[in-house]
Image (cartoon, rainbow, N blue to C red):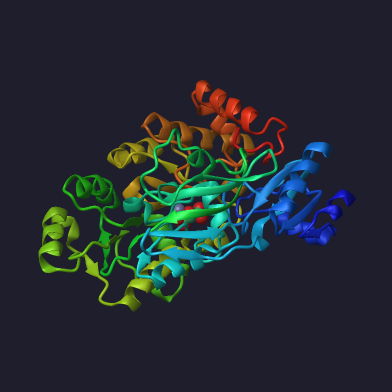
Amino acid sequence: MDLLRSLPDTTLLTELDALEPFRHDESHLVGHVPLGVVRPRSAAALRELVRLAKAEGFGLVPRGAGTGKAGGCVPTARTVVVDFSAWPGDLNVSSQDLALTAPASALLRDVKAAAIAEGLFYPPDPNSWESCALGGTLATNAGGPNACKYGMTRHWVLSVDALLEDGGIHTFGISSVKSNAGPALGQLLIGSEGIFGLIVGATLRLTPLPREYATLLLPVARWEDLLDLPGRLCGAGYLPSAFEFFDPAVLAELRAHGPEEARRLPGEALAILEFDERGCTSEPFLEGLLDLLGPVADGLEIASDERQRKGIWAVRRMTSAFLKERHPKKVSEDIVVPRSRLREFFAGLDRLGFPSVSYGHLGDGNLHVNLLAAGETDPALLERQLMDLFRLATSLGGTLSGEHGIGLAKRDAFLALSDPAHIQTLRALKRAMDPAGIFNPGKVI
Ligand code: MLT
Ligand code: ZN
């Protein structure tokens, strides 16, 4: 598209070969070939881009590092991909304000490292944390294991800078946890997957860095014994910073075909629990925990040093890629139910009767239910299976996505299963904030 050549401070890609990688993220979806990929470097570039999009009737699809799991950055028809990887800006930590300012282009690993360098902690830790861009984590409200204690990305955002439909960049929020001058519009942008405006930067909330970790491997002989534990622990005042699990099938596959560390994993099923509060490695804390766990803790192992802790997490972190490599056409979902209803969820999943394996964030009820045979399943049947899965989660007070978002992948299911008033409200907001429909068209709603 020749008009894009007039954009100031912008790198433009138009060659077919160069556009091809931008049709994908880490979901199974393949999008349209975009009209072009732009890498803007100034507010003037974005202003002109918005003007052109409105005048020429094309859409703008924001993209960070392309590590999303729901197709949020996969191009729909007649769109230009806005790749924020060259967006300028520095990382600045204010230890007095417990705040960190960063551009959308910053990698999450650099954001986390900048906080750590000041003895501070930015908790969001999606599985892609070493390669994803901050902007993508804000647009998708990314989660991760630490959400069990610390919540999602949105809980760590003080203010957001976003490109709106007037072509300007506007800031929502201030550098303080206390800010109550009207509804929090910035929160509307977090997790909106770019349908209301495009996030170019943010000020994030930090907290003191934990100084102590107790990382526990909890193997069990009967995997159902894990299901009440998240609720029981929380009910008794033990809130893990992470509580992950592998069901027997995932564990068996990891043990048989995974890396060296995975081959030594114990149990029929396995949970990884981590605590990070002061005193969590002390005897009274661990004894209290053992008392609470009772006989289920018989095989409990405690990571003895940082090397062992890292080894355990390395296995957990590679599980998604490992399963994908072995089952390239699998479908991985990320439903969520309240932690108190995990047992009912798995009983319901059993009743549904289709083959699936599960692992993930048991502690906060966010489960990666994987349909490994999706590639060999009739597409109409697969769709029914997925809808049944989503309905089950919804019927238990949960929802169809705990952390990956809706994007393109879950749009139809989201529209079918949501309260119509919810969708109407979102669409009214979309019309108000994006009357020309230029921002990430065809996504979410
Ligand atoms: C994970 O927690 O491993 C990812 O969010 C799951 C996935 O890749 O499906
Ligand atoms: Zn996950």
In this rendered view, identify the residue nearer to me: 272 or 202. 202
- At horizontal 79% and vertical 49% (from top left) the residue drawn is 33
285 lies left or right of 250: left
* Number of marks present in the image shown: 0
409 lies left or right of 38: left
In this rendered view, identify the residue nearer to me: 321 or 132. 132
Q: Residue 95: where, in percent of width, then height?
A: 37, 64
Q: Quadrant of the C terminus?
A: top right
**Is residue 101 visible to the viewer in this orientation of the structure?**
yes
Q: Residue 380: where, in percent of width, then height?
A: 62, 34
Q: Residue 396: where, in percent of width, then height?
A: 36, 32
In this rendered view, identify the residue nearer to me: 7 or 331. 7
Q: In the image as oriented, which residue stretches furthest toward the top? A: 421
- At horizontal 66% and vertical 57% (from top left) the residue drawn is 84
Q: In the image as oriented, which residue stretches furthest toward the right? A: 2
Q: Measured along the vertical axis of the image, is residue 290 above or below residue 413?
A: below
Q: Measured along the vertical axis of the image, is residue 242 above or below residue 433?
A: below
418 lies left or right of 48: left
**Is residue 370 visible to the viewer in this orientation of the structure?**
no
- At horizontal 26% and vertical 53% (from top left) the residue drawn is 222
- At horizontal 60% and vertical 55% (from top left) the residue drawn is 26
Q: Measured along the vertical axis of the image, is residue 67 above or below residue 159?
A: below
In this rendered view, identify the residue nearer to me: 370 or 291. 291
Q: Residue 118: where, in percent of width, then height?
A: 38, 70
Q: Measured along the vertical axis of the image, is residue 120 above or below residue 234?
A: below
